[in-house]
Amino acid sequence: MDTPLDIIVKRDASVEEVIGYTLYEYVEDRRQPVIPQALADVIYWNMRIVEDDGSIDDDFPGMHLYYHMNHLIFNASLKKIFQF
């Protein structure tokens, strides 16, 4: 398994900003697999809550791009971003 990509964002950052920053860090870190240029836009991605084992928690829908991190209060983990 790859090393997790840890990022730090401001509490008032939007989901869109977090996804964009994460994509940027992923590319800058030369992570694999390489994201095709056609999918290197925030609109093709969403943020989902995952279980401790890394599987998507289907009880929660993807988060709207305009939501801000400080409005997302829960005990689940926001460790991964998944393409839809």
Image (cartoon, rainbow, N blue to C red):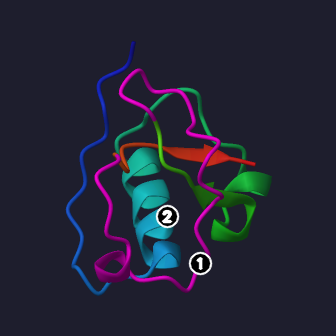
Name the outermost residue toward the top. 1
Q: Measured from the top left, where is residue 79 in percent x and y?
A: 36, 44
Q: Measured from the top left, where is residue 33 in percent x and y?
A: 58, 27
Q: On screen, 20 above or below 77?
A: below
Amino acid type of the residue that numbered disc 2 sits on in the rendered structure: Ile
Q: How many marks?
A: 2
Name the outermost residue toward the front. 59
Residue at screen point 44% across, 59% down: 24
Q: On screen, 81 above or below 52?
A: below
The residue labelled by disc 2 is 19
Q: 10 Å neighbourhood of mark 2: few (<14), some, or many (≥20)?
A: many
The residue labelled by disc 1 is 65
| Mark 2 → mark 1, Cα distance in angstroms | 9 Å
Q: Is residue 31 left or right of residue 39?
A: left
Does the CB distance between marks 2 and 1 fall below 8 Å?
Answer: yes
Quadrant, the N terminus: top left
Q: On screen, 81 above or below 30?
A: below
Main secondary structure along the magenta-highlighted residues: loop
Residue range in magenta is 51-76
